[in-house]
Image: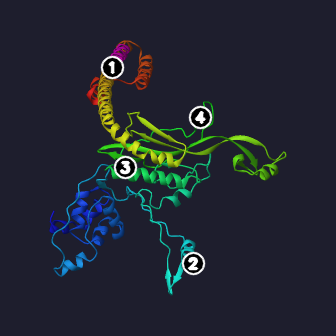
Amino acid sequence: MSESDLSRETDSDSAKSNQRPVTRERLYELVWSEPMLRVGERFGLSSTYMARVCKDLRVPRPARGYWAQREFGKAPCDRPPLPPARPGDVNMWTPGRSLSQPRRAPMRPNQTAILNRGSDASEEGGHVVQPPRKPVKKMHELLVGAKPHFLKTRKTEAELLRPYKRLLADIVVSEKRLDAALSIANDLFLGLDAKGHRVTLSPPDARMRRAQFDVREVPSKNHYYYGIWSPDRITVVYVGNVPIGLTLFETTEEIETVYDHGKYVPVRDLSAAELRRYQGPHHWRTKQEGATGRFRLQAYCPHQMVAWTRQWRAVTAKELVSLVPVVVQELEAAAPFLVSQVVEAEARAEAQRRQWAEESRLRREEEERRRQAKLRQDATSDLLAAIDAWERARRIQDWFAAVVRQAQDLADEDRLQVLGRLEQARALVGGADPLELLKRWKTPRERE
């Protein structure tokens, strides 16, 4: 689309299309045809937010100062091509809806740590020598700045976090083991990325379900089981074009606790002196679900009709990290099998949809036949009722005529009395006009 074509769009047209979905191709043409500020005005948004939309849809946009340089003929004529969409990429954006990827500001460095680092510096020859810094571990994009959001949590049961934010990686863990869980997830996500398998959140409009799992080490029946935290969108890895869901969770088990002022304290966390203090009628011991510190990784097919899951268990975080190559290898091996399972599931779903459609068609046809039969029955009943009314009215009229004829033979006084009563009878009974009755009658078609 040329720049002149875009500029001819009126404000009213923009207002009408303000809530319509925008494709990547359309957005690409817009941002390279006019400044971002003007693009944002089309949708009632700021240029900063539109830059986030471009980043979310992987649409390249002009660099800062591009339009000023172009005004003086200094801007480059060539623009970068629109990259092809990757598996799991969002290909369309609807104004007013949230973006597919969460926006997280990176954590600010601890000011105390900075001061301590400065105090550890030594002086050599009048120069301050800083100690060598440890290399910073690379973080996967899904986990950058995620820790503070996990710590902003509701009151937890079994010590597992239930963060308020729901647009996070699918990790269910206690606060004590949060760092270990994030490290495991980071190693896993980076390992998958290194093999060319993209790890991301599922697209907002994708119909992907999260497979169920039980955090308890020993599930039991007829036992109260609390709800655990779940994200708004699942975490998936695309092995080729095959999406596979990922959930990392810490298991729980029954542990001995002691009651103290409205809360249950794990006995394993108390010293001998603290145990002696928790004595008396106001403290009692009971069994409660508590986090074990052990992890499980679950992979699953997010398709609604494919019930495939795979779990890896580890006693320690180091053990689960060592399983990352095995996990990657098994997910790669499972991808072709899942493709066939999804194809079969889609075929079953299509056959079921056709069956439902046929059953619905037959049901509608039967209902229509019944409705038409009822219309004919009602029309026939009304017509017969009109005929019966006319027959009854004709008999009444014949009776009135007979009374008039016989009244002619009566004496004047009696004849006047009979004819007077006859008029009162006519007014009471009335008459029936066959043409009027036919006009008021409705055919089956008129009753639809």
How far apart, in angstroms, are the residues tagged by discs 4 and 1? 67 Å
Q: Which residue carries the number 1 mark?
A: 377
| Image spot of residue 72 (x, y percent) | 18, 82
Mark earlier in primary sequence (2, 4): 2
How far apart, in angstroms, are the residues tagged by discs 3 and 4? 31 Å
Q: Which residue carries the number 4 mark?
A: 218
Front residue of this view, candidates 123 and 20:
123
Q: Tags 1 and 2 in contact by the CB under 8 Å rule? A: no
**Circle 4: residue type:** Val
- Residue 116 counted in the magenta span: no
**Circle 3: residue type:** Leu
Q: Tags 4 and 1 in contact by the CB under 8 Å rule? A: no
- Bin the neighbour count of mark 4 within 10 Å (Cα to Cα): few under 14, some 14-19, many 20 and up: few
- Bin the neighbour count of mark 1 within 10 Å (Cα to Cα): few under 14, some 14-19, many 20 and up: few
Q: Which residue carries the number 2 mark?
A: 119
- Bin the neighbour count of mark 3 within 10 Å (Cα to Cα): few under 14, some 14-19, many 20 and up: many
Q: Which residue carries the number 3 mark?
A: 192
Q: Quadrant of the C terminus?
A: top left
